[in-house]
Amino acid sequence: MSDDPLFPADFLWGAATSAYQIEGSPLADGAGPSIWHRFAHTPGRVLNGDTGDLACDHYRRLVEDLDLMAGLGLGAYRFSVAWGRVLPEGRGSVNPKGLDFYRRLVDGLLERGIAPMLTLYHWDLPAALQDRGGWLNPDSPGWFADYADLMFRALDDRVPLWVTLNEPWVVTIPGHLDGELAPGHRDLFEPPRVAHHLLLAHAEAVAAYRALGRHRIGLAVNLEPQHPASASPEDRAAAARRDAFINRWFLDPLLLGVYPPELAALFGPAWPAFPDADLKRIQAPTDFIGVNYYSRGLVRADPDVQPLGAVRVTPEPAPRTTMDWEVYPQGLTETLLWLKERYANPPLYITENGAAFADGGPLDGETPDPRRVDYLRAHLLAAQEALAQGVDLRGYFVWSLFDNFEWARGYGQRFGLFQIDPVSLARVPKSSARYYRDLIRRHRGGSRGRGA
Ligand code: IFM
């Protein structure tokens, strides 16, 4: 295989971001606060006290950023809508100025020949809904479906690709068990119900979409193959449990109509008896799966860690990013082939892939980031291998367009193709931006891909 990835001419080339991580101005023009606004402003929750108040200032630099995407030659851009900009209370009255921002974003993309992929929920629940119990409230799927319906009516004539939820597992576990991410809960009894409501929220939004949408809708999940850290039966069993816990928790009910049986065993009395009718609703057909891939899980049994009885370890020595994630491109091929085998070859997009490295450098030229270039190349070759083995892979989105607010880790983790000058907020390209632009150009031969 050559060193230069080669994909079909109609492959979709994109970059991804999310609202709270880049927009800034979280309360501008009548927007309601989100749980992330609240969390970041709670002392001790985010490293260095960083917040999304300014972020990349994308809300005010929209046109400049659209031009920058056009300069890269992107075929698609994946972004998320801040629910509370559109519905400040999460439901009820619409904030026209908030909706208008996303109209201008979508129109600006289309004017530049870039297909919008719109994610409805990337973790920033309106704080007013959290005050009603958030995703623990059995009404939460209905709140989400009403918001989704509003967005479909406003934008489906121009948005060809919709993602309901981004990484529901992260909402469920770091958000409600580990307490690391908003809303910062630590309660063994919450994750099963939160996850179930997220799945129902996805299903109800898809049902609303079937009634009026004309394009395609899917779900984005974080996946990583789980490998035992040793050949011991304990580590093997721990890796199998972690596979059910992370990779299958959402996909099995969605695509096979059942929860992995391991989950009820892990959660014990905290796992409710979910009605069969709910599982039937959840299994309604989805048009594609979005795969967010960064690394693998190397798993060691650890009875002190509950409920999983397992921890992720980093092999020594191993190339790794500043997130302490092992660089493991072959895991992407493995993940894509696993999806093909287990779930009957569903249409896939890699909706996130990228790496945090501590690159910084001249703010007046191009910032060298050779490790990110290597990371992207290796992962694209891994994706190409999966495609060659029959995986129905349709596109790839780099995470992320900019260095941005990496949640509880603040601004210290840099995933971007562009760095942001901390004073002028100028967007400074890294070598990876040039690498990606050239790669896209080579594939397009000057013309646009199939869009979506
Ligand atoms: O920054 C996040 C993104 O919001 C969700 N997926 C993983 C990325 C890197 O941690």
Image: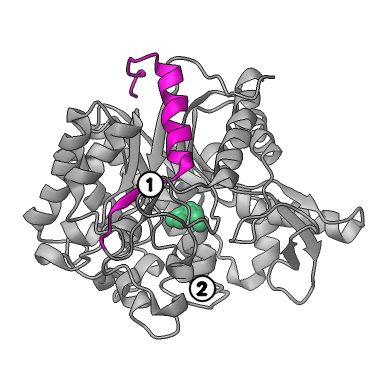
Q: Is mark 1 within 8 Å of ligand 1?
A: no
The residue at the point 29 percent across, 76 percent down is: 131
Provide residue 145's location: percent of width, then percent of height: 28, 50
Image quadrant in which the N terminus is located: top right
Dots 1, 2 in contact, CB < 8 A? no
Q: Is residue 432 magenta?
A: yes
Please identify the residue farthest to the bottom as the structure is shown.
43
Image quadrant in which the C terminus is located: top left
Q: Is residue 114 magenta?
A: no
Q: Which segment is the magenta one? A: 424-452
| Secondary-structure class at tag 1 | loop
Quick check: 94 above or below 71? below
Q: Amino acid at mark 1?
A: Gly
Provide residue 92's location: percent of width, then percent of height: 13, 61
Is residue 423 left or right of 89 when viewed as pictured? Answer: right
Q: Earlier in the sequence, mark 1 or mark 2?
A: 2
Please identify the residue farthest to the left as the structure is shown.
96
Q: Amino acid at mark 2?
A: Glu
* Residue indicated by mark 2: 180
Question: Toward the viewer: 1 or 277?
Answer: 1
The residue at the point 31 percent across, 57 percent down is: 22
